[in-house]
Image (spheres, rainbow, N blue to C red):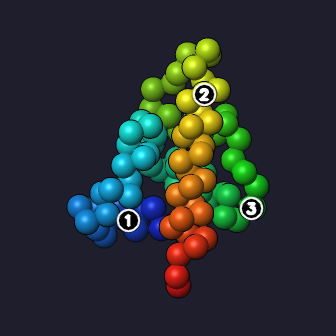
Amino acid sequence: MLYLKRLVSTGMKRNKHLLLPFVNEQLNTEKVESIINQHLFTEITPLRDDVVAAMLNKPKLMQRKKLAQRALDKIMRFIETFLIDAPD
């Protein structure tokens, strides 16, 4: 499912607010898309290390756990809201 890429390519201006959590967390949208697709395929919660790898600016070790968990929560909320609960 390439929902995130479709959001970016077809209606970024209209759906810009949907991408805002990923932009605010300074995440690479292509890597986030990969994380989302992997989660949808395997139904396994992504690792924080995968989220850290998607960050454009790598946080310091003391901040890494907190920032990665916050970004992971936003990704999972996005999946639950727009992909799992979305009407077909």
- Verify CB contact (< 8 Å) between mark 2 and mark 1: no
* Upstream in sequence: badge 2 or badge 1: 1
Q: Give the CA separation, mark 3 to mark 1.
A: 22 Å
User: Measured from the top left, where is residue 68 in percent x and y?
Assistant: 59, 33
Q: Nearer the viewer, mark 2 or mark 1?
A: 2
Q: Nearer the viewer, mark 2 or mark 3?
A: 2
- Figure check: 11 above or below 46: below
Q: Give the CA separation, mark 2 to mark 1.
A: 28 Å
Assign a secondary structure to mark 2.
Answer: helix
The answer to whether residue 34 is visible is no
Q: Amino acid at mark 3?
A: Glu
Q: Amino acid at mark 1?
A: Leu
Question: Which label was assigned to residue 66?
Answer: 2
Residue furthest left as drawn: 13
Q: Which residue is mark 3?
A: 43
User: Measured from the top left, where is residue 3 in percent x and y?
Assistant: 48, 67
* Location of residue 63 by image quarter: top right
Assign a secondary structure to mark 3.
Answer: loop
51 relative to 56 in the view: left or right: right
* Location of residue 65 by image quarter: top right
User: Measured from the top left, where is residue 15 in percent x and y?
Assistant: 31, 63
Residue at image x 74%, y 61%?
43
Quarter of the picture containing the N terminus is bottom right
* Upstream in sequence: badge 3 or badge 1: 1
Q: Amino acid at mark 2?
A: Lys
User: Measured from the top left, where is residue 61 in percent x and y?
Assistant: 62, 16
Question: Which label was assigned to residue 71?
Answer: none
